[in-house]
Image (tube, rainbow, N blue to C red):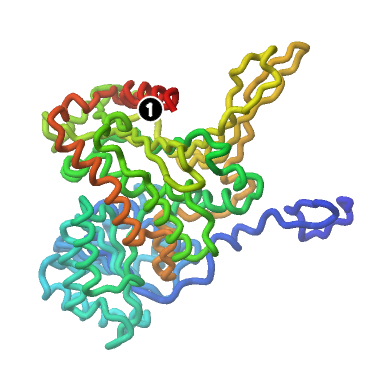
C-alpha cells in the first residue's frame, strides 16, 4: 500500500505484510474506562501528609481529566478541630504549592467536607454515619462509600471495628450502597500480627470489600511488566532458567528517613520494602501466565511464586544477605547526616536502612536462578528497575579472535524515574579488525504518547471505585511473604553480633562494599 493509498484515519498505524495493523490508539481510549459509580470517599486521618500530598491531588487530577463519577463527595476526618472551610483552604494551599493546575479547583472544592472525629470513639463513627446520610440527601451517591485509612497501623483494627458497629460496613441495607475499606501498608509487623489484623477487619468487612493498597503496583511501568512478558512472543520462550543467569531487582532511594523515624526505627528496610514492594516486583517477574487477565487469576499466580520461595537458610543468613545503615555523606550536592543523627533515631540504633538479599524460586521455570533483591535509603540515585541478565553463549566460534569472555545480553525494565525498557546485545564494531561492542536498544515508556497519564494513587483510587482488586494485595499473598521473611527477621534481630553484621555505608554511595563483594562471590561460586 502506498502512502497516498493509506486511509487518513490510519496516520499512526503500521503497514505489515499488506495489512493495516494498529500499533497505537488515541490517548483518550486508554486513559479511562467508563466513569465509576457515584460515591463518597471518606479519608480517615485526613490531617496527615498523605492526604494533602497524594490523595487529594490524585482525586483532583482525576476530576480534571473527567475520570470521576458525577456526583461524588470527599469527606476528611481527623482529630483536628477545624471547619470544612479551613480544610478546603489547607488543601488548596497544598495543591498550589505542588504546582497543580488550579483552573477547575472552584468546581472541585464544594465536593470537599470535613468532620472532626476521635479514632477510638464509637460516638464519633455514629456521628459520621449521620453526617454522611445528611450530605447524601442533597447529593445522590447511592450510598456508595470508600473508607480510606490514612492512619498508623495500630489504629486499623479499632477503626474497622467502629465502622462496622456504626453500620458503615454494611452493604445495600438501610440506604447504604457498596462499602469498601482501603488499608495502607504495613500489613502487620510479622506473620501473627498480619493474621490478627486480617481477622479483625474481616469481622465487619468481607474480602471483596477490602483493598490492601501497594502504590508500587499501580505504577504504569509495573503494570507493563505483564504486558511486556506475555504480549510479546519473542520473550516468553526464553524467560526461564535455560536462558537467564540471574535477576536483579533494585529499589534505591536518595531520601533518608525524613520524618518517619518513629515508624522506621520499628520496621527497618526489610519490613518497609521487602515484605511488600520487593516481593510484588519479584512475583511479577517470576509468575506464570494467568489463564485470563482477571484479578483472581493474576493473584493465584503471584501466590504460587510466594509459595515456591526457597526457605531462607537461617543457618547461613549472612551468606545470602547484607544489611547496612547509612552514615555521613553527600547526596547530589548536599551534605547529609548519618541515620543515627536523624531526629527521632536512637544514637546507637541497629536498624538497617539497606539490604541485599539472594532468593530462589523453586519451580520448573526458575530452579537454580538467583534473584538479587536490593533496596536502601540515601543511595546514589533514585532508581527502581528489574534487570534480566541472560546467560553467555554456550559456545564461542570467536574464541581464537576474541577469547571466551563475551558478555551476555541484558534486559532492563526501568520503573522510576526513567520509565523505559532497554536491551543490550553484542555487535561488530566498524573496521577491518573483528571487535565486538555492546549496543543498546532503548524504548521510553512515554514514547509516541502525548496524552494525560494516571499517577499511581490515581490508578489505585480509580480501581477501588470500580471494585477491581487486581493491583491490591490478597491476604494469602501477605501471609506467605511474612512466612518467608519472618525467620530472616528473627535471626537478624536476635543474633548476638548484630552490630558487627550491620555495615555502614556513605550516604550517596551504592551501599556497603560488602554487598558488591558478596554478590560477586555468590555469582562466582554458582
Q: Would you place residue 147 above or below residue 27 in this image? A: below
Q: How many marks?
A: 1
Examine the image and state in which quarter residue 457 appears: bottom left
Is residue 493 toward the left or the right of residue 19 in the image? left
Q: 525 or 143: nearer the eye?
A: 525
Examine the image and state in which quarter residue 442 appears: top right
Residue for point 16% across, 57% down: 154
Q: Quadrant of the C terminus?
A: top left
Q: 143 or 153: nearer the eye?
A: 153
Q: Would you place residue 440 above or below residue 188 in this image? A: above
Residue for point 18% across, 64% down: 157
Q: 290 or 232: nearer the eye?
A: 290
How busy is the neighbourhood of tag 1: few (under 14 within 10 Å), some, or many (20 plus)? some
Q: Secondary structure at mark 1?
A: loop
Residue for point 18% across, 78% down: 166
Residue for point 36% across, 51% down: 96
Disc 1 designates what residue?
380
Asked whether the viewer can see residue 260, the reply is no
Q: Position of residue 456 (x, y in %)?
A: 42, 53
Q: 173 or 207: nearer the eye?
A: 207
Is residue 171 toward the left or the right of residue 158 in the image? right
Is residue 443 toward the left or the right of residue 132 in the image? right
Asked whether the viewer can see residue 469, the reply is yes
Is residue 438 toward the left or the right of residue 196 in the image? right
Q: Position of residue 468 (x, y in %)?
A: 43, 67
Q: Position of residue 85 (x, y in %)?
A: 25, 65
Q: Position of residue 500 (x, y in %)?
A: 18, 24
Q: Would you place residue 295 above or below residue 430 in this image? A: below
Amino acid at each position: 500500500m502506498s502512502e497516498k493509498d493509506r486511509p487518513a484515519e490510519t496516520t499512526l498505524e503500521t503497514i505489515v505484510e499488506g495489512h493495516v495493523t494498529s500499533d497505537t490508539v488515541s490517548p483518550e481510549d486508554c486513559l479511562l474506562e467508563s466513569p465509576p459509580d457515584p460515591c463518597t470517599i471518606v479519608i480517615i486521618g485526613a490531617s496527615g501528609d498523605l492526604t494533602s500530598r497524594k490523595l487529594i491531588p490524585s482525586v483532583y487530577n482525576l476530576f480534571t481529566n473527567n475520570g470521576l463519577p458525577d456526583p461524588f463527595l470527599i469527606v476528611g476526618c481527623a482529630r483536628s478541630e477545624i471547619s470544612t472551610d479551613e480544610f478546603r483552604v489547607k488543601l488548596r494551599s497544598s495543591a498550589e504549592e505542588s504546582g497543580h493546575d488550579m483552573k477547575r479547583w472552584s468546581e472541585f472544592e464544594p465536593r470537599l467536607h470535613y468532620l472532626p472525629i476521635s479514632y477510638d470513639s464509637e460516638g464519633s463513627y455514629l456521628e459520621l454515619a449521620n453526617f454522611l446520610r445528611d450530605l447524601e440527601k442533597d447529593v445522590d451517591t447511592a450510598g456508595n462509600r470508600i473508607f480510606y485509612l490514612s492512619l498508623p497501623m495500630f489504629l486499623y483494627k479499632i477503626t474497622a471495628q467502629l465502622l462496622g458497629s456504626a453500620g458503615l460496613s454494611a452493604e445495600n441495607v438501610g440506604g447504604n450502597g457498596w462499602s469498601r475499606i482501603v488499608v495502607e501498608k504495613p500489613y502487620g509487623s510479622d506473620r501473627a500480627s498480619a493474621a490478627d489484623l486480617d481477622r479483625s477487619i474481616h469481622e465487619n468487612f468481607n474480602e471483596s470489600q477490602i483493598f490492601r493498597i501497594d502504590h508500587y503496583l499501580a505504577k504504569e511501568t509495573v503494570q507493563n511488566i505483564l504486558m511486556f512478558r506475555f504480549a510479546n512472543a519473542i520473550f516468553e520462550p526464553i524467560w526461564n532458567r535455560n536462558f537467564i543467569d540471574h535477576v536483579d531487582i533494585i529499589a534505591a532511594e536518595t531520601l533518608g528517613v525524613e520524618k518517619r523515624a518513629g515508624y522506621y526505627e520499628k520496621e527497618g528496610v526489610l519490613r518497609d520494602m521487602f515484605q511488600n514492594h520487593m516481593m510484588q516486583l519479584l512475583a511479577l517477574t517470576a509468575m506464570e501466565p494467568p489463564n485470563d487477565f482477571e484479578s483472581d487469576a493474576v493473584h493465584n499466580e503471584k501466590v504460587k511464586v510466594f509459595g515456591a520461595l526457597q526457605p531462607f537458610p537461617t543457618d547461613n543468613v549472612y551468606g545470602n544477605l547484607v544489611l547496612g545503615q547509612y552514615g555521613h555523606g553527600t547526596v547530589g550536592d548536599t551534605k547529609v547526616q548519618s541515620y543515627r543523627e536523624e531526629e527521632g533515631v536512637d544514637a546507637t540504633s541497629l536498624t538497617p536502612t539497606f539490604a541485599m538479599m539472594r532468593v530462589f524460586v523453586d519451580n520448573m521455570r526458575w530452579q537454580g536462578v538467583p534473584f538479587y533483591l536490593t533496596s536502601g535509603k540515601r543511595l546514589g540515585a533514585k532508581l527502581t528497575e528489574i534487570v534480566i541478565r541472560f546467560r553467555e553463549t554456550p559456545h564461542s566460534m570467536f574464541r581464537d579472535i576474541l577469547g571466551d569472555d563475551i558478555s551476555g545480553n541484558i534486559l532492563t525494565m526501568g520503573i522510576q524515574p526513567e520509565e523505559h525498557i532497554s536491551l543490550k546485545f553484542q555487535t561488530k564494531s566498524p573496521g577491518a579488525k573483528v571487535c565486538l561492542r555492546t549496543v543498546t536498544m532503548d524504548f521510553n515508556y512515554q514514547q509516541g504518547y502525548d496524552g494525560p497519564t494516571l499517577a499511581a494513587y490515581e490508578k489505585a483510587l480509580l480501581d477501588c471505585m470500580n471494585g477491581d482488586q487486581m493491583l491490591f494485595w490478597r491476604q494469602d499473598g501477605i501471609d506467605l511473604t511474612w512466612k518467608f521473611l519472618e525467620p530472616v527477621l528473627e535471626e537478624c534481630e536476635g543474633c548476638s553480633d548484630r552490630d558487627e553484621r550491620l555495615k555502614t555505608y556513605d550516604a550517596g554511595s551504592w551501599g556497603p562494599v560488602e554487598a558488591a563483594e558478596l554478590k560477586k562471590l555468590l555469582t562466582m561460586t554458582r
